[in-house]
Amino acid sequence: MRLWGGRFDDEPDARMADFTRSIDVDGELAIDDIAGSIAHVRGLGRAGLLAPEEVEALERGLASLRDDVEAGRIAWDPSLEDVHLNLETLLTERVGPVGGKLHTGRSRNDQVATDLRLWTRRAIDRLDASVLVLERALVGLADRDGDAVLPGATHIQPAQPVLLAHHLLAYVEMLERDRGRFADARTRLNVAPLGAGALAGAGYPLDRAATAAELGFDGVTANSLDAVADRDFVVDVQAAAALGMVHLSRLAEEITWWSNPRFGFVHVADAFSTGSSMMPNKKNPDPAELVRGRTAGVIGGLTATLTLLKGLPLAYQRDLQEDKPALFSAVGTLDASLRVMAGLVETLTIDRDRMRAAAEEGYTTATALADALVRRGVPFRAAHHIVGGLVGGAEAEGIGTLAALPDEAFRAALDGSDDAVARSLADAPGIAAELRAAATLEGSLAAADVVGGTAPARVATALADARSRLGI
Ligand code: ARG
């Protein structure tokens, strides 16, 4: 018998039943549904709506269901529509007619809203742990090989040298913001809808706050209509997950380029690579590519949920059942992506020589050289012009780096400047050696000596901060 069947004369059409059931998806909520029911039963007892022995019988039945769910012993009955009706039916089979009292003062509308908040809270805690695993992997690599020098790029063109540790710590910053967004979402979602009933509020004097506290909520929802219709917390988490995936996708993108032999900066471990069915030479960073690819679905899921909500009047509408697939999939995809990227980063091999050789290309120390002239009193714009001339000259002569220019080239460039201070430096003793030192990779790195800059001492501080925050 269908639990809601009293007013119906006819059986559901199979097409309707197939179309509306959600048990294949919301079975995932079973543990949370049982936790919510146990708290609700205790609340009914406190309100005098259940006798102590009824509370005990229901709690015992629910606990046995929880054991069976955890052990994977439950086979859901598809004819029972969703997880809520499945569990209530199973409970009644176990405890007898008292099972019929479970749903007193409760609707599936406040029930599913409660379950989903509990599920999402657990999901956030799981994701937070996984984000930390990846942060530790990045910091571990920074510890191991962080003093390697990378060609920092803008517009994908060689720009200025940076330490590999600095680059990796940029991703740690992104991941820390991700953790913050999930923590914010967790705070906001942690109020209990139970007691809102179907939409108007339960018809019994339930102590909502006590039930909420028992479930670890910080309080109760303030408006029953909002309580059953609100899925903002789903959007919050999907938005945070989408941005988290975007961060991973950017890292994945870099690893695919860096592992191309043209770059040769890194080698992805065999254990995180796949081959080609046709080309025996191939070794592909497929997990990185799939992280990048699956980001699309997580972004799409966020759009789907926002679109789902935009046309819904108050209060509960059945459309809301469609909140779960996208949320569950976003959480599962992000969690798996964090873990596979952690493994990939942990096992990455760095080719410092290749990185360093690339960092030397493209006259990446030009800015540091201009800054050295500014420290000698040359206006920055004149210094920029002088160094631009040196870059052009070196390129024309086939000299690969500014530090490789002869003394005469530095002196001539200063001498030919419009700026009087620059001209006066042309004959300053040791000027060529001074400028050449500024134009080395080490000189350039050391010059970026501000909080958040890539100077080795600054990066060492940032790395120490990250290590202590992560407890490693
Ligand atoms: N399976 C439903 C969902 O996930 C549960 C709530 C159904 N409520 C209702 N009045 N039909 O949204």
Image (cartoon, rainbow, N blue to C red):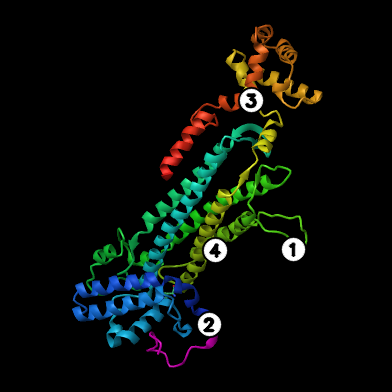
Q: Residue furthest right?
A: 397
* Residue 13 highlighted magenta (yes or no): yes
- Find disc 4 in the rendering and name its residue: 304
Looking at the image, is mark 4 or mark 1 earlier in the sequence?
A: 1
How would you classify the magenta stretch by its main secondary structure? loop
Asked if marks 1 and 3 touch (Cβ < 8 Å), the reply is: no
* Residue 208 highlighted magenta (yes or no): no
Q: Position of residue 229 (x, y in %)?
A: 41, 66
Q: Position of residue 360 (x, y in %)?
A: 69, 30
- Find disc 1 in the rendering and name its residue: 277
Numbered disc in front, either 1 or 3 = 1
Numbered disc in front, either 2 or 3 = 3
- Find disc 2 in the rendering and name its residue: 18
Q: Quadrant of residue 53?
A: bottom left
Q: Residues within 10 Å of mark 4 (few under 14, many from 20)?
A: some
Say which element carries label 4: helix
